[in-house]
Amino acid sequence: MPAHAKPTFTPFADDAAVQTLGDLTLENGTARVVLHGSLEFARDRESLERAKALKETLAAIVTALEGEADLPERAQEVRVATKEVKNPFG
């Protein structure tokens, strides 16, 4: 592994890992992997490296999903419990 390479992102392995490629962030979770932001590619070596890293990460996500024995048609939506708090300004 080159000195500048980051550790491998293992999809669905934990609820803490984050991988950043340019302005694109991949947040790991045991139920979902979330991508947000943007990623720009130019005709240069740096873009080639980012593209390879993205390809590797997406391939790992596909492999993880293909390895699921009983994959549902669509995952249930995860809802986070909210708590109402008093407005500190009003």
Image (cartoon, grey):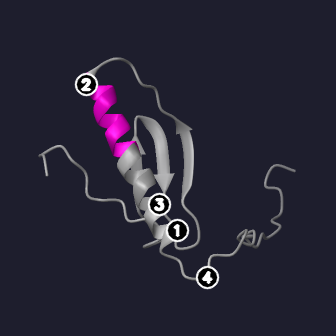
Residue for point 12% across, 46% down: 3
Which amino acid does the dot numbered 3 rest on? Answer: Ile
- For disc 3, the marked residue is 61
Q: Residues within 10 Å of mark 4 (few under 14, many from 20)?
A: few
Find out whether residue 38 is within the magenta segment: no
The residue at the point 39 percent across, 45 percent down is 55
The residue carrying mark 4 is 70
Point out residue 1 in the picture as x, y percentages from the top left corner: 14, 52
User: Dot 3 surroundings within 10 Å: few (below 14), some, or many (20 or more)?
Assistant: some
Q: Main secondary structure of the magenta part?
A: helix
Q: Amino acid type of disc 1?
A: Leu
Find numbered disc 1 in the image and state the secondary structure of the residue it sits on: helix
CB within 8 Å, label 3 to label 4: no
- Whichever of labels 1 and 4 marks the residue nearer the N terminus, that label is 1
Marks 4/2: CA distance?
40 Å
Considering depth in this image, is 90 or 71 the residue closer to the camera?
71
The quadrant in which residue 83 appears is bottom right
* Marks 3/4: CA–CA distance: 16 Å
The stretch of residues the image draws in magenta is: 45-54
